[in-house]
Image: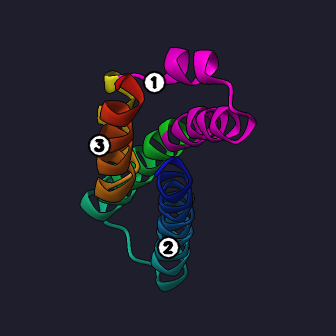
Amino acid sequence: MVLVALIFAILALIGEIVVLGLVGFASAVMSEQGIVSPVASAELGVIGFLSVIFLIIDVVVISRTWKMYSAVKNGDIATLKSLNSLGWAIVALIFSGVIPGVLLLIAHGRIED
């Protein structure tokens, strides 16, 4: 469960990096074409800013999920239970996508048992 959540969180991270690249590309095209639009620039700025925020939070979620996976792999139940958090599963659900969040929610229930 945790490994699959980690894989999908990494895929979400790659998607966020692609979005940042597309924002940069759109900005370059706008400046090259001489398009001066405060609205378009503001939209690109907001999308870029939100992408950076999602990217940072996704890196933190991946780091925590990696620690959980390492604890599972090493059989360290105490560390796994200390890392198991419903709050982090919800953060993963919001910022890393539905699949990692749902898998961490399912893993949360199994770890608690």
Membership of 64 in magenta stretch: yes
**For the residues bearing labels 1 and 2, Cβ distance under 8 angstroms:** no
Q: Which residue is mark 2?
A: 22
Q: Is residue 77 left or right of residue 40?
A: right
Indicate which disc, 1 or 2, sits on the residue closer to the N terminus: 2
Q: Which residue is mark 3?
A: 94
Residue at horizontal 62%, vertical 18%? 79
Residue at horizontal 36%, vertical 55%? 47
Q: Which residue is mark 1?
A: 84
Look at the picture and state if 14 lies above or below 50: below
What's the distance in space between the residues labelled 1 and 2, CA to CA? 35 Å
**For the residues bearing labels 1 and 3, Cβ distance under 8 angstroms:** no
- Which span is picked out in magenta? 58-85
Q: Secondary structure at mark 1?
A: loop
Q: Is residue 29 left or right of residue 85?
A: right
- What label sits on residue 29 in the rendered view? none
What amino acid is at disc 3?
Ile
Please state the horizontal and vertical placement of residue 61, each as a whole percent of the image: 51, 37
Look at the picture and state if 73 lies above or below 83: below
What's the distance in space between the residues labelled 3 and 2, CA to CA? 22 Å
What's the distance in space between the residues labelled 1 and 3, CA to CA? 17 Å
What amino acid is at disc 2?
Leu
